[in-house]
Structures are given as structure tokens and as C-alpha cells.
Amino acid sequence: MSLLTIVHYPDPVLLAIGKPVGDDEFGPALEATVLDMFETMEKAGGVGLAAPQVGISKRLFVMDTPNDDGTNERHVLINPEIISVEGEQTGDEGCLSFPGLYQVVKREMRVIARARDINGDEFELDVADLAARCILHETDHCDGIVFLDRMSPLKRQLAKRKIKALQKTGKWN
Ligand code: NI
């Protein structure tokens, strides 16, 4: 396994629509990439990481969100689709491609997503709270959408100013 380099906003790969993972791409190479993505995410202290964030313009992401009982839910979602959403939650959100930036983002409270697993088998996930927020955030990455795009105009202006300040400190690149 090896650590991958996380790209930071505004790298163009973050703003591009990822290509679907093809049937012929399932196998050892994809498995290795997914393991590297888990390792990279854990090292960076994130709960989700999408392929575009490591410079791979493909539709897949890994997530590892904590449950209330202290256990974790580790998933890889390949070619994810949001099937249905319900409710609303408002809370702080961060992104490994926006180091040091946390901003309030409104998201749906519950999500049903469909995806393929590492073996290519289709499955569905029905989740709420942080896991729902994570799935929505990471599926956005597959569509070239970053959390900045999900903020209110006022919050986005504030966030852009914070990004400029963070870039000046040299911690951003
Ligand atoms: Ni992100």
C-alpha cells in the first residue's frame, strides 16, 4: 500500500465530472487503489475520500464514518447514485481538499444510495446524519462539485476569503 497525494482546491480535477468505472476495470488494480485511498483518508483524518481528490477522475469514493456505539462503517461506493433523500441537517462540514476550512453546509438528513462494491456487485445503503452528509459530499466530488458550491452565497464569500488567508500561510498547497 502507498499513500496518495491529496489535491487541493482549485485543482481542475476537483471540478471535472468523473468517468464511470467500467466493468473491465474491476480487479486487483482497482482493489489496490481503494486500499490506498482508505489508507490516505485515515492518515489525513477524514471520514470520506473521493477518487478525484487523489487526482483520479473516476466515480468512486471510500468512507469510514463512526456509529453511535463507537464502531465504524467502512464502505467503498463505485459509480454511486443517490436514489432518494429526506429531511434536512445543518452543520459544519470539512473537506480534505480544503485543508483547515470548516463551514456550515445544509444537507439532506437521510440518503438512500446505490453503488457497486469492490467485486462489482450492486448494493444499497440507507443512512442518516454524518454518513448521509458524507455520501452526499463524496458523490458531489464524483460530479465535479465541491462543498463550496453547496454553501449560501454569503458563506461562500466568507469561505473564499478564508481560503485566500490560508493560502498566504503556505498551508494550503
Ligand atoms: Ni471533500
Image (cartoon, rainbow, N blue to C red):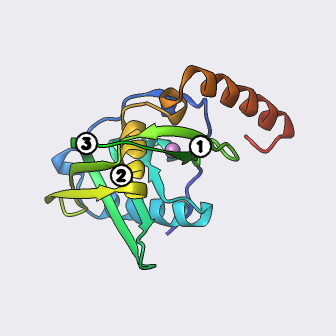
Query: Does residue 34 appear anywhere in the picture?
Result: yes
Name which quarter of the figure residue 85 lies in.
Answer: top left
- Does the beta carbon of the residue at mark 1 sit less than 8 Å from ligand 1? yes
Specify few, some or many for label 1: CA neighbours under 10 Å numbering under 14, 14-19, or 20 or more: many
Q: Quadrant of residue 88?
A: top left
Answer above or below: position of 132 versus 19. below
Query: Looking at the image, which residue is at 57% across and 47% down?
Result: 92
Q: CA distance from mark 1 to mark 2?
A: 19 Å
Q: Are marks 2 and 3 in contact (CB under 8 Å)?
A: yes
**Element marked by disc 1:** loop
* Quadrant of image for the C terminus: top right
Residue identified by numbered label 3: 85
What amino acid is found at the position of numbered circle 3 in the picture?
Val
- Give the mark toward the camera: 3 or 1: 3
> Relative to the observer, which residue lies in front, 14 or 162?
162
The residue depicted at 30 percent of the width and 50 percent of the height is 110
Q: Earlier in the sequence, mark 1 or mark 2?
A: 1
Which is nearer the eye, 82 or 80? 82
Query: In this rendering, would 91 be left or right of 62?
Result: right
Of mark 2 and mark 3, the one earlier in the sequence is 3
Residue 51 lies, in percent from the top left, at 43, 47
Residue at 51% x, 47% y is: 54
Q: Is residue 21 visible?
A: no
Q: Tell me the SS state at disc 3.
A: strand
Residue 15: image location, x then y, percent:
48, 28
Please give left or right for residue 26 compared with residue 64 in the image.
left
Tag 3 near tag 1, CB within 8 Å = no
Residue 132, labelled with which disc?
Answer: 2
Q: CA distance from mark 3 to mark 1?
A: 25 Å
| Amino acid type shown at disc 1 | Ser
